[in-house]
Image (tube, coloured by chain):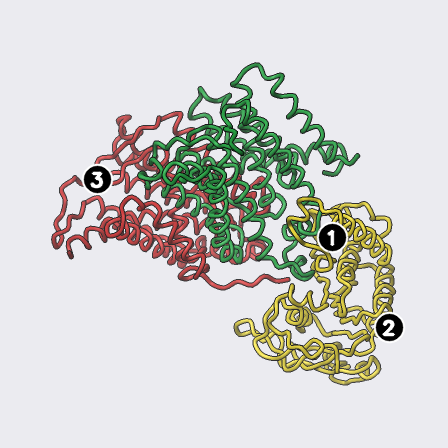
Amino acid sequence: MLAQFLQFLFSGVTVGATYALAALGFTLIYNASNVINFAQGEFIMLGGMLAVYFTTAGLPLPVALLLAILIPAIVGVLVEKLAIEPVKGAETVTLIIITIGASLVIRGLIQVWLGKATFSLPAFSGDEPIQVMGATLMPQSLWVLGVTAIVVVLLWYFFNRTLSGKAMLATSYNPLAAELVGINTGWVLFMSFAMSAALGALGGILITPITLTSYDVGIMLGLKGFVAAVVGGLGNGLGAVLGGLLVGILEAMGAGYISSAYKDAIPFVLILFILFFMPRGLFGGKSTDRV
Amino acid sequence: MALLEVKDLSIHFGGVKAVQNVNFSVDSGIVYSVIGPNGAGKTTLFNLITGVYKPTTGEIRLDGEAVHGKSPNELARRGMARTFQNLQICMNMSAVENVMVGAHLRLDRNLVKAALRFPALRKRDAEMRNEAAGLMRFVGLDKFADARADSMPYGALKRLEIARALAMKPRLIFLDEPAAGLNPKETIEVDHLVRKVADSGVTVVLVEHDMKMVMNLSDRILVLDYGKKLAEGTGEEVRRNPDVIAAYLGAHA
Amino acid sequence: MKNTTKGLVIVAVILAIVPFVSPNSYYTDLAIRMAINATIVLGLNLLIGFAGQISLGHAGFLGIGAYASAVLPTHFGWHPLLAMGAGAAVTAVLAGLVARPIFKLKGHYLAMATLGLGIIINIALRNEAQWTGGPDGMPVPAMSLFGFELSGDKHWYWVVAALLLVSIWASLNLIDSPFGRALRALHGSEVASQVVGVDIVRYKVAIFVLSAVFASLMGSVTAHYIGFVSPNFADFFHSIELVTMVVVGGMASVFGSLVGAVLLTALPQALATFEGWETVVFGAILMGFMIFLPKGIVPTIAARFGKGE
């Protein structure tokens, strides 16, 4: 009984870490520009797919992984320059549609270039499962959780202790005021898309040895990441992380105890539930419109 | 009994007490102005009375009926209209349609009848279009009769809002800084317009900074400062009140 | 004659001529698909273009209608018309239940909720294989009206053309009515529409339910016409295709809906041999239009010539 529970918990927390990274990505961009970047999921997909491509092309693992994070970051910046900037200040509907368009372009290009097959990466430190109280834990899970934890701490440090980080936070609270005190809000936007994409890509790389990757994993991962961001309270970093873990765990528990066929539906039932009863999420603040 | 009664009205936004224990009443048929320095809480007070904000404490009564906490569309049903300091015009529609929207509650809103083009509905709509055009003439916008809202200048749009509010055939109209952003000539025109509106039988509650206009038009004036009632009375009484003078001009005036 | 009446007559004439100039079945079939999409997009445009809301899961409603027409006659012996009505009823209830709480929120939340709903419906259709035939889909019995069985493009063309024409007429009427103006005002300024008495949430719910029911009915029609349904019909990409049609043809434009539907129904056919490129092209179209032609084709052209719509 306990073993089974732990098993679901482990897999839930592992995939939850990926959702957390995706949710952080959404949060970064939302805070910098009030845009919900529906292309976030594709950055996750790019991370995994590019890592596979570069390792099979013969590049050493660290180089391949670095490229698999750098290139999506560049793609992220391109999305910002080509899709978001031209329509600064447009209606929400417009922005949502544009980012969906960007996600289609990215996914389609990968499909054309790398095909529709499923790929995997070798686990970073082997496949030998670790026994914990009757449940098995894959070493790769430890990588996922460990790296995510380090990244979250680094991000916390960046936003709370460095000047650039604080500049980004300031921009999210009031872009105009930030500009007036000399913060380069264009740079902030640039950085948030780049970081967001890098975070997503990292998550995609880490999880590929466990859940595999293909050209269309982005949709579901991205959407679930968005669910996590909303659950935690859109715009709140801590909420994003906790939201991600929560969504991952609930999904795994639901799939294990209730029905595995409806596994993918669980996050969406959760989001409807949250939107009905707690739309601000766990940590979201109240907002009032000035009229 | 006054048309509008406000008792001990307050609203707190976190630590900010934007409006504190404000009391006043407005009799039917008069022009009642609310003035005060910037940030005194005038627009917040408007938003409270017109249902855009919910009060933290206090009562608002319209014709004796308690209406605090009701939503704007419920208040519209009870004959309350308003215009906005920051224009709220539907730029996706024509000028006439904006005015016609004001008459929303007076028309048949049935979806099925509309889709099937019931003759009675079409006829009423055509009549309404004429009435809207008439209202545009009333507020001085005849030359924009066929214009789209997004092609009209700022001053014209301010009047369009008034026309829209009048289309409701309201008992009570709240004008939030109708002369804001207008040059002296336009301000005088708005002054005349407000007089016309008041003369047509509608009770007018006005927020305005232009003192000449306020003194010209108002039967009674409420002065707010820091969200609190500073003074109330006729133009003469308020003008002489030392607290009012101090608030506007500084304590050494 | 008003511009819109002229437009209606032109469409009617085109619809009447098509079957006679169509070289073969392939083109008639294409025309039928275009007309079906146009009707769905009309309903969706009322929601997105006129009322300024969004639905990223509309294909889910198509699926409910389509599968109602498949499952109820096949497994329960219902008459197809009754099944179609049941599909529409279920859709109306579902849309109404979801809409009420959601429309109290704004923008992204609405997008997310509609997206989630669409995905849940799609997963359910895929999983309940014993009723729905699972991922492979299932056949749909023919529709019969007053004992006359409708089959093949010869019959269906006229049914679909008539439905489209009536929908255009009804939409045009709706837009230029108090209800329609309230919707458009809602898009223009929610606060302003509130203070003139519009019950915002009720109107948003009403238009959402209306456009969902449109979709459900046309889903049933599609199911009977093609004779087969599969879960792909109700997937996310299909929802996006529909939104693209609205965007390209023109948000808040009745005739734009037609143009968008015609162009983007033809496009996949043209790209049929370039599989992955279809996705890229759709994405590029979405982006390109939102940046360069945000009003869509018809309103942009109309503005150029100084006419109103």
Image quadrant assignment for residue C306: top right
**Helix, strand or loop status at disc 1:** helix
| In the foreground, C28 or A214 | C28
Q: Is residue C5 left or right of residue B51?
A: right
Q: Amino acid at mark 1?
A: Asn
- Other residues around mark 1 within 10 Å, as few (<14) / some (14–19) / many (≥20): many
- Reading the image, the residue beneath label 3 is A124
x 66%, y 41%: residue: C170
Q: Which chain contains the residue that carries disc 3?
A: A
Q: CA distance from mark 2 to mark 1?
A: 30 Å
Task: Report in which chain the residue with disc 2 lies.
Answer: B
In the rendered image of this protein, which colour is used for chain C? green
**Secondary structure of the residue carrying numbered label 3:** loop
**The chain shown in yellow is which?**
B
Quarter of the picture holding the N terminus of chain C: top right
Looking at the rendered image, the disc whose residue lies closer to the viewer, 2 or 1, is 1
Tell me the colour chain A is drawn in.
red
Closer to the camera, C296 or A98?
Answer: C296
Contact between marks 3 and 1 (CB within 8 A): the answer is no
